[in-house]
Image (cartoon, helix red, strand yellow):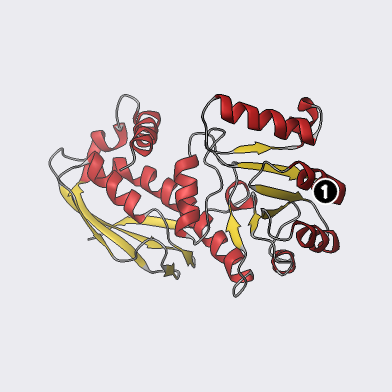
Amino acid sequence: MDPEIVDIINLAIKEDLGDGDHSSLACIPPNNIGKAILFAKESGIIAGVELGKYIFQYIDPKCTVEIVKKDGEKVESGDLILSVEGNERFLLQSERLVLNFMQRMSGIASMVKQYNEAIKGLPTQLLDTRKTTPGLRKIEKWAVRIGGGMNHRMGLYDMIMLKENHIAYAGGIAKAIQQTQAYLQENNLTIPVEIETQNIQEVREVLECGGVDRIMLDNYNIEDLKNAISLIDKRYETEASGGVNLTTIREIAKTGVDFISVGALTHSVKSLDISMLVDR
């Protein structure tokens, strides 16, 4: 497991456990072995199964987990997702942690699937953003991949994105790009560069200057989006952002844009309802 995700799990355990699970310690003998099942209470795309299995076995290395529904598979209400057998105290200690992660991840994967269905048959690729829950980005972006989406940059370190505020502070598009290229050369960096534009005139400024890998077309209407993509003429990758929802995304994709980024995939998602019950 990714060490960063293990760190997240440890923090979550510490947050929940404190000085002990007194509910379980109070009424369950220490050596009892039991079984439990996880099942879906609504339809969607399941995600976090492998993570859930890891958490169960991280807390109780002797437990056994049988996976019935794999990450990325569709589930209906009542479907069995996995069963687990192990120390009853540890099962209950794991329960809420596993459910919290799996419900959140499954909600994200389900939304990603909906958006991908909306642009089915078109070459445009769906991207997430940095609009994630602080501390949970790795897990939420994992869920995006499970749902069939692509990850945009992971953070501020793996891609340069010159957004509206960067451009304003730098003194304009040309200065922002020139200073960025100088910075990359001075620091021997090869990370990609993307620049945000608000209108066709700004696209022209970027094309005149060059020095980027992708041009973001932010909050463009469909006509302007088509014109911008025609003007760019595949010299750079293109990304549409802003005003994207399930109603608008197909028309945006039909313009021929390479990528569409959707912040809602991680910041406005509804968790999928999943439960754990003792299996008698």
- Disc 1 residue type (three-letter): Arg
| Residue 198 percent across, percent down from the top left | 82, 46
Q: Quadrant of the C terminus?
A: bottom left
Q: Residue at x 38, y 42 (%)?
A: 97
Asked which quadrant contains residue 1, the reply is top left
Q: Which residue is mark 1?
A: 204
| Residue 93 percent across, percent down from the top left | 30, 40
Residue furthest out toward the bottom: 121
Asked which quadrant contains residue 180, the reply is top right
Q: Residues within 10 Å of mark 1 (few under 14, many from 20)?
A: some
In front here: 251 or 93? 251
| Residue 217 percent across, percent down from the top left | 75, 51
Q: Is residue 93 above or below residue 186?
A: below
Left or right side of 64 for 18: right
In front here: 250 or 25? 250
Asked which quadrant contains residue 114, the reply is bottom right
Q: Residue at x 76, y 41 (%)?
A: 209
Q: Number of numbered discs present?
A: 1
